[in-house]
Image (cartoon, coloured by chain):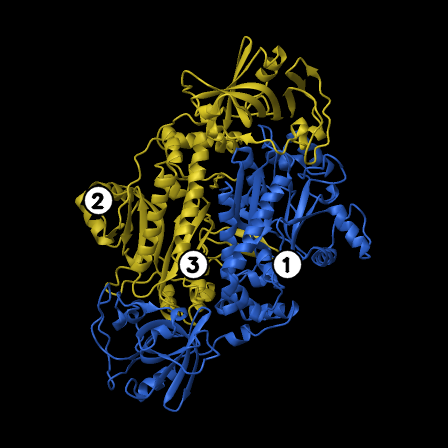
Chain colours: A yellow, B blue
Amino acid sequence: GVAVGGEGGGEGKGLSCGLTPNSQPKGRLCFLWQKKSFEVINCVCLCLCEPDRVLVRVQDLTPENADQLIWLRARVHTSRAKGKQCFLVLRQQQFNVQALVAVGDRASKQMVKFAANITKESIVDVEALVRKVEQKIESCSQQDVELHIERIFVISQAEPRLPLQLEDAVRPDGEGEEGMEMWKCLSVCGCVFILPKTTTSQAIFRLQSGVCQLFRETLTKKGFVEIQTPKIISAASEGGANVFTVSYFKTSAYLAQSPQLYKQMCICADFDKVFCVGPVFRAEDSNTHRHLTEFVGLDIEMAFSYHYHEVIDSITDTMVQIFKGLRDNFQTEIQTVNKQYPSEPFKFLEPTLRLEYTEALAMLHEAGVEMGDEDDLSTPNEKLLGRLVKEKYDTDFYVLDKYPLAVRPFYTMPDPNNPKYSNSYDMFMRGEEILSGAQRVHDAQMLTDRAIHHQIDLEKIKAYIDSFRYGAPPHGGGGIGLERVCMLYLGLHNVRQTSMFPRDPKRLTP
Amino acid sequence: GVAVGGEGGGEGKGLSCGLTPNSQPKGRLCFLWQKKSFEVINCVCLCLCEPDRVLVRVQDLTPENADQLIWLRARVHTSRAKGKQCFLVLRQQQFNVQALVAVGDRASKQMVKFAANITKESIVDVEALVRKVEQKIESCSQQDVELHIERIFVISQAEPRLPLQLEDAVRPDGEGEEGMEMWKCLSVCGCVFILPKTTTSQAIFRLQSGVCQLFRETLTKKGFVEIQTPKIISAASEGGANVFTVSYFKTSAYLAQSPQLYKQMCICADFDKVFCVGPVFRAEDSNTHRHLTEFVGLDIEMAFSYHYHEVIDSITDTMVQIFKGLRDNFQTEIQTVNKQYPSEPFKFLEPTLRLEYTEALAMLHEAGVEMGDEDDLSTPNEKLLGRLVKEKYDTDFYVLDKYPLAVRPFYTMPDPNNPKYSNSYDMFMRGEEILSGAQRVHDAQMLTDRAIHHQIDLEKIKAYIDSFRYGAPPHGGGGIGLERVCMLYLGLHNVRQTSMFPRDPKRLTP
């Protein structure tokens, strides 16, 4: 819907707008126009069609603009009429400013009424005088100025009833499960799409965009090449568990559970160092705070010269560059999120702490945990280990190296010095796994032997094994879950908070 | 397989290698070791385990290195034994250098024999003396030096028979269909994976990586935020044609044909300007040179102030920055591709040429084409128009603006001045479409009316329409096909050449 209030008339000017709105001037400074038509909707400009006019950003409004007449496009965040005045809070993303329409020289009674009736979340253009205020406006991001509105135009009118009040969505909720409850509720009413409007969500997803950018920039500087890998594949590389099936013309296909095979093929094709960023699909019926059926994988694979620790060093350095970049360039976003979800600042060491699996087991044993040398870590034990490591080394990020061979996939390179262990590693943030990686077996015969040992059907992985028959450099890599990195960096408790449109066994919309 | 030749013995040193190879020193400078075992394969280092040793890059070998003893890891590109000598060409990606093993002080007869028996495409470590040559070696990228090998170790042994000779893969083939033939043939023998090894493919995919990087850098500078959109969706937004179905636990889902709905939701959630890079799926049974069932979409969406040409200007400027970046930073890659597939340099104007649909029709009419005002352009007419535009304006890139409303999707904003046309546009490179975009209808009622006009089931697009009920800024955008941009920039004739692992109705592997 569109409605216009403010000084009337005037032919549309500039670009394509040739419309003459059927204006109804009322007094010097106001006209109302409720007509809703094709021409009004698709021509933003209306009588506002002034391509040379500059729209000011809310975040740029400071006392330096005092007494200037400015144009602004923003959402009506709140509106409160009081006698001959109407107070509005106008919002742009996480920034907002107080605005005022008052009966007097600059506005008529009708205009105040018009402003008071604009629905929350509508988008308006206002022409207003910037005024410095005596007392700070604590409720707004722009605390030192307010706007005295002279003209107001509704660019897009929101429906009167919102499915959820934004104020409710940004109310601090407790740990874990409560946050989860809100998500469930939103999912039920089908209006998750409103969430990214909150200042918290805005901040989360800007930071997420930063993680991707820092990841790619760091790797590009290190000589990595970005590759694009297919998501529709003909065979499930690890034997077919937890894989989504796609109808593909007259046959069936699968959704890739990881780009690993393709990354490795690029290494075999002499790309030397590659990375990719893209969706990864897991048909796992896990309804936990950290599992999604579709997430964004930040994947790395590289040939190395002499030792797979060259790979670990590249990955940990990349993570450190990401942590530093976030710390240095995303403080506003971090603090915005902390207001709703308080957490300790994320700590990391340089160089990154690398523990061997046996050392970790010793720490856990000392803390009273009973587990065998070749057992995998349970999620609670991972968390406990995270706390022990934090106490001892004061870091939220570390590498756990040399996992037992028995708990890793068949393509993992065994440790040459101790066949019970492997050249593989996980990386942890705040005690939760964010990356799993390893040196890969690059010899076709050895890979075949390992697959047989794991009782994997060789027919199904023939293409994979054949990739290594024509000369393969020693290589390794790993895959990072973007949503987990963002969740754990910010100290959040549900991966759905860092996925804009989360997918889990029960959620497919929006 | 692993085999080692060269000066023998010595304990493995450094990092994890604690192996003592059972060396069989034969003469001063050679030992052969054909043992193939677990320890040999997964410890690259063997007796080479010298983490402080620097491996030189082929591309850095110049006469400045003359008389230096260097270490190098590379593939055996070709090998030719001749009496007491063996000539090897050693390759790293698109760079190669001639190397020589000759019986004498530095190598024994056995070592020459050993070198001569190394299979093509095997990866070797060599220690060699760099020698300046009198006469340029025309067949190598490093023409001024050759390597006199003192030690040679096989790091990874290729099988003796390659499924395709690399020399065949880089042989210049003619236009269009021939290139296609090679792809078909490769597809049949199941060895497409060897293609990226060719210097041409290396160059193509490095350039592709550059396109993505330039796209993101330019948009990030313009204030765009990167978003991640889901690929598994609950409903096909445009009514269900050409969409892949996924089994999703106990229900069905679809693969996203475009991120458009999600981009638009982000605009409604005040992200202002967003982009995303990710796979796009089309279940279209089109077997042409320019259709893939899965391709990489470079997508843009932005709110604008007064006119949708602000969107066109942002997109065309982004394309121009990409073209300039490729021209300035990827000349080696462009020339490498041109050697196999000659083409004219890509031409573009600043600012980008923008033609209106009616102007284009007039040009086509003048050239003898008969078509109605509201007809869509056929592919041959697009190509013809591209040639006419090139003749008249000397540009390979232009925008065609104001398409007939009738040929565009229901969410396209009509032209306020002429309801036969729309605020929509395509962009073309060398006469082929690379982007389709438009101002979107941002008013829920108008969108409903347009959907009804297109006889679309409103139930199926309810979520989409509802996104616009809570205030939506005027906005527009478009989606670019990455593979097409690379194909057309380089003047190639099949989109399969710019997709590392192409997917079409008949191809799902590798």
Which chain hosts label 1?
B
In the rendered image, the vertical position of residue B373 relative to residue A445, given as above or below: above
The residue most toward the top is A83
Q: Nearer the viewer, residue A476 or B360?
A: B360
Q: Find out whether the residues at labels 1 and 2 contact each other: C-beta distance under 8 Å.
A: no
Q: Nearer the viewer, residue A133 or B200?
A: A133
Give the residue displayed 42% in from the left and 55% down from the top: A220
Q: Position of residue B171 (x, y in %)?
A: 56, 74
The alpha-carbon separation of the residues under discs 1 and 3 comes to 26 Å
Give the mark, 3 or 2, whose residue is nearer the N terminus. 3
Q: Determine the secondary structure under disc 1.
A: loop
Q: Position of residue B317 (x, y in %)?
A: 58, 47
Q: Label 1, on which residue?
A: B290
**Residue count near mark 2 (Cα–Cα under 10 Å), binned few <14, some 14–19, many ≥20:** some
Q: Label 3, on which residue?
A: A274
**Residue count near mark 1 (Cα–Cα under 10 Å), binned few <14, some 14–19, many ≥20:** some
Three-letter code, disc 1:
Arg
In the rendered image, the vertical position of residue B317 relative to residue A43, given as above or below: below
**Marking on residue A469:** none
Q: Quadrant of residue A417?
A: bottom left
Q: Position of residue B331 (x, y in %)?
A: 52, 63
**Marking on residue A393:** 2
The residue most toward the bottom is B83
Give the residue displayed 65% in from the left and 57% down from the top: B396
